Image (cartoon, rainbow, N blue to C red):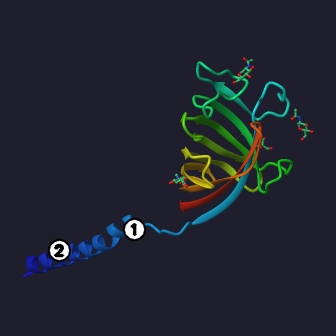
């Protein structure tokens, strides 16, 4: 009598665990298609050209055999690697107070068209944001908008992931460009 009761209790527990499992496991895989957080920033890149050391925020550190480290190479700058430490602002004004730095590199990676590959972080150390957001991806520069991956973050952006849409907001000669970055996080903590 007693053992029968025990067995049925066991079955009841097993049944509830099964139900719980059915509800809990698929939920893990279904992620929201709507962003959990959105932010917009601008960053400003002034590339060193042999004359602007004081203002420059980036420098050519790699060049193909037919180029040099002062001027971006021919053939759509193919083979150039540029390291940058650019100010981030909340609007499109280079002289607005920076809220952080965009730090990393871009690589021009195609002879036939103007395109690059980006790997960088937004590093924040302000009253509004602390921490970093890490980005990587292909940047086909001639497209009006380009999506790159937000591959993670630290501090206020701990474990975040998402997509950042880049737009060239200004392009002045070969020396200055400004990118608008629309960040959509799809994973927030
Ligand atoms: C550096 O920036 C200042 C302030 O924006 C500007 O007046 C100056 O012309 C710039 N110098 C160079 C070499 O670009
Ligand atoms: C670098 O290359 C450019 C052309 O790509 C050339 O005009 C310039 O004189 C070169 N500079 C040096 C320092 O070799
Ligand atoms: C962040 O800002 C604080 C206060 O201005 C400063 O003491 C600290 O060195 C900064 N940290 C970095 C990594 O820039
Ligand atoms: C860039 O633009 C071209 C032509 O408009 C299009 O075919 C291509 O798919 C775009 N690439 C990306 C990554 O958006």
Name the foreground residue: 46 vs 4: 46
Instruction: Give residue 76's mark.
Output: none
Earlier sequence position, callout 2 versus callout 1: 2
Local packing at callout 1 (Cα closer than 10 Å; few below 14, some 14-19, many 20+) is few
Which quadrant of the figure contains the N terminus?
A: bottom left
| 179 sits left or right of 95 in the view | left
User: SS of the residue at dot 1?
Assistant: loop
Instruction: Give residue 10's mark.
Output: 2
Task: Please report contact status of discs 2 and 1: CB closer than 8 Å, yes or no.
Answer: no
| 172 sits left or right of 20 in the view | right
- Can the viewer see residue 177 in this picture? yes
Alpha carbon separation for disc pair 2 and 1? 31 Å
Residue at the (61%, 54%) spot, across then down: 157
Residue at the (84%, 26%) spot, across then down: 51
Residue at the (55%, 56%) spot, across then down: 163
Q: Can you say whether 5 is above or below 89 in the image?
A: below
Horizontal and vertical percent for residue 10? Answer: 17, 74
User: SS of the residue at dot 2?
Assistant: helix
The residue indicated by pointer 1 is: 30
Horizontal and vertical percent for residue 58? Answer: 73, 33
Displayed quadrant of residue 27: bottom left
Name the foreground residue: 127 vs 89: 89
Residue at the (61%, 37%) spot, across then down: 106
């Amino acid at each position: 009598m007693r053992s029968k009761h025990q067995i049925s209790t066991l079955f009841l527990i097993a049944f509830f665990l099964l139900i719980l499992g059915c509800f809990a496991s698929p939920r893990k895989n279904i992620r929201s298609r709507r962003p959990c957080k959105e932010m917009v920033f601008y960053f400003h890149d002034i590339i060193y050209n042999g004359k602007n050391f004081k203002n420059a925020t980036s420098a050519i550190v790699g060049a193909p055999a037919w180029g040099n480290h002062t001027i971006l190479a021919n053939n759509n700058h193919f083979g150039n690697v540029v390291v940058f430490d650019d100010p981030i602002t909340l609007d499109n004004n280079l002289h607005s107070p920076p809220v952080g730095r965009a730090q990393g590199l871009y690589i021009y990676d195609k002879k036939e068209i103007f395109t690059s590959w980006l790997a960088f972080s937004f590093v924040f150390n302000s009253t509004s944001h602390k921490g970093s957001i890490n980005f990587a991806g292909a940047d086909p520069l001639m497209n009006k908008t380009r999506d790159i991956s937000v591959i993670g973050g630290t501090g206020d952006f701990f474990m975040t992931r998402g997509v950042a849409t880049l737009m060239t907001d200004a392009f002045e000669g070969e020396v200055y460009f400004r990118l608008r970055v629309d960040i959509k996080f799809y994973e927030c903590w």
